[in-house]
Image: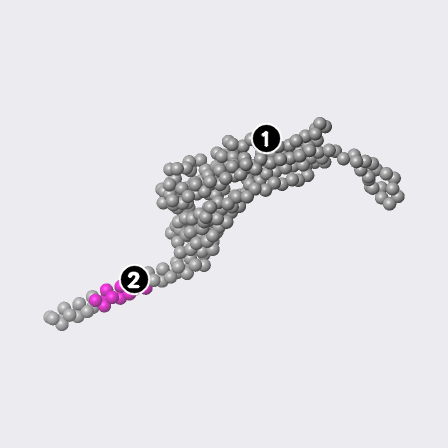
Amino acid sequence: MKQTITYYKKNNFNVIRKLTLITLSIFICVTLTFHISAKLLYPTFLNYAKMQTNKLSTALVNKAVQTTILTDLEKDEIIKVKYQENGIASSIEFNTYVINKITSKAANSVYSNLKYIEEGNIEHIEYDRLGLEVDTNLLSKGIIYEIPYGMAFHNALLANFGPKLPVRFTVLGEITSFIESRVSQYGINNALIEVVATLKIKMQVVIPLAAADNEMNYEIPIAIKVVTGMVPTYYQGNNALSDNFVIPIK
């Protein structure tokens, strides 16, 4: 009788041990499969993550333009043109103080909103007006997007397959800005003057087990003005070398 009981105990122990080893082997194989495939698909996941951070940054820059630049901007304060008696422009001056003030205000607005979203403090911003469809429960955790695992296969049937990878970001340093003035020909005797501010944003995109730096440049037109110049007067002579040979009178 004792031998029979001992046999059953040994038999049950062997079955449990085999089931444990099989379960552990399956778990390890599945984990390694996901890990290896994830390593191969991480570039695709990071590209999706960068796309989402670009959308977010663009929306925040547009918001800064609407709430700061457009409300404070007056074209006459930015570009001042002095004219002669005949209506021809003689000199052009830029109000650098106003330009720097507007640019700095826009950069601070974008930086503050990015930090609020990074930390999950979405109650400080009007996120519903940015036009981005993200669950507020995720945003409160600092997650701006969740990438379904199946999106990496570029197949509509597998788009929502598998676990979802949360996308987070970290702002790297301050948002830098620089201002550029551009002059281009506009028509025959006009010049198009543009004052453009460029915001440079550096962010680190983070998904589970991977991260990548993302740098974005956004050009914001501060002022655009058309300045009228003098129409050139030309004399076309009968030159034997070329019928299109012209000499300006002035």
Assess whether residue 24 is covered by the magenta stretch: yes
Decide: is 134 above or below 231: below
Badge 1 element: helix
Colouring convention used in this rendered image of the protein: one colour
Q: Main secondary structure of the magenta part?
A: helix
Q: Please name the residue that numbered disc 1 is placed on.
A: 76
Q: Residues within 10 Å of mark 2 (few under 14, many from 20)?
A: few
Q: Nearer the viewer, residue 230 or 117?
A: 230
What span is colored magenta in the figure? Answer: 13-26
Tell me the tag on residue 23: 2
Query: In the picture, which quadrant includes the N terminus?
Result: bottom left
Q: Quadrant of the C terminus?
A: top right
Q: The disc labelled 2 sits on which kind of residue?
A: Thr
Q: Amino acid at mark 1?
A: Asp
**Quadrant hosting residue 220:** top right
Task: Determine whether, in the image, residue 81 is placed left or right of residue 43.
Answer: right
Name the residue located 39 percent from the left edge and 54 percent from the top edge.
Answer: 208
Q: Give the alpha-carbon distance from disc 2 to disc 1, as whole Å.
A: 75 Å
